[in-house]
Image (cartoon, rainbow, N blue to C red):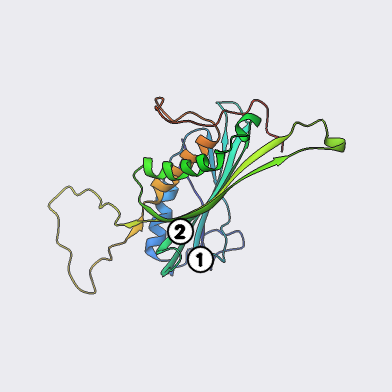
Amino acid sequence: MAAVQGHLSNGADGPDGTDAGGDDTPPAFRHAVTALRGVRVRPEVELDPTPPPRRLAPYSYALEAVVTGASGDDEELAEGRLILLHDPAGHDAWRGTFRLVTLVHADLEPEIAADPLLPEVCWSWLTGALEARGLPYGEPSGTVTRASSHYFGAMGEREPSTKIEIRASWTPSDHPPPEPARSGPRRREPAGEGAAERLVVPDTAGHLAAWCDLLCQIAGLPPAGATEAGVVSLPQRRGPQAR
């Protein structure tokens, strides 16, 4: 497993969205991004930085992921993008200062694509992944789209295909980050203007891990570790994904 690196946007970055090291970036946002960069993911998940959008919030950070098959298999089973947004002033629609936005999609087998309950099931995978890791969240919103393609003319020999797409956003609940372990007796912090600021940030590492769980589930991979009862994933596709 590899730790994540990424792009940070605070309005003063270079054209590729990389961090320019501006001192005006809020400490809470830097803490949230640092936690994301330390997450280690399953070997089937390839997680890479991508330039974040600049108009959705004053501060943003983005990652993109591809889920592949077993070791040595380069077939892409699912892919997605996760964006962390931050507005220190808060946002009425978010009901918070942080927001996570995602786009996930994967190709489906015809028999799975025909299931009328597929959109509801896919949405429950998102909320279930967050709840399974005990992550508090609010204001979830999104769509699940099932799109079928039929090919004609010079492409008529290709089999029909169906893609599922999840577009969603939610507000991760804020909580104080854990304090570092102390070897000696705890020293009382001074009060007043010289006191250290107590950051309040969401568990972005946990939310990224849950998002990777969703990607693996929609890709048809079994849960990491021992088989978990009651967890159903989409069957892996039989053929390579058309690009």
The quarter of the displayed image where residue 87 is located: bottom left
Left-right relation of 198 to 235: left
| Residue 10 makes an appearance in the image | yes
Is 112 or 135 nearer to us in this picture?
112
From this viewpoint, which residue is outermost toward the left? 185
Q: What's the distance in space between the residues labelled 1 and 2, CA to CA? A: 9 Å
62 or 188, which lies in front?
Answer: 62
Q: Is residue 31 above or below residue 222?
A: below
Which residue is label 1 attached to? 57
In x, y percent, where is residue 73?
A: 61, 27
Q: Which residue is mark 2?
A: 99
| Badge 1: residue crowd in 10 Å (few <14, some 14–19, many ≥20) | some
Residue shown at 53% from the left, 68% from the top: 11
User: SS at mark 1?
Assistant: loop
Asked whether the beta carbons under mark 1 and mark 2 sit within 8 Å of each other, the answer is yes
Specify whether 82 is left or right of 28.
right
User: In the image, what residue occupies the spot 50% across and 68% down?
Assistant: 58
Q: Position of residue 32 (x, y in %)?
A: 40, 55
The one nearer the camera, 120 or 84, is 120
The residue sitting at the right extreme is 153
Residue in the picture at 43% in, 55% down: 33
Picture quadrant where residue 153 is located: top right
Indicate the secondary structure of the residue bearing disc 2: strand
Say what amino acid the circle numbered 2 marks: Arg
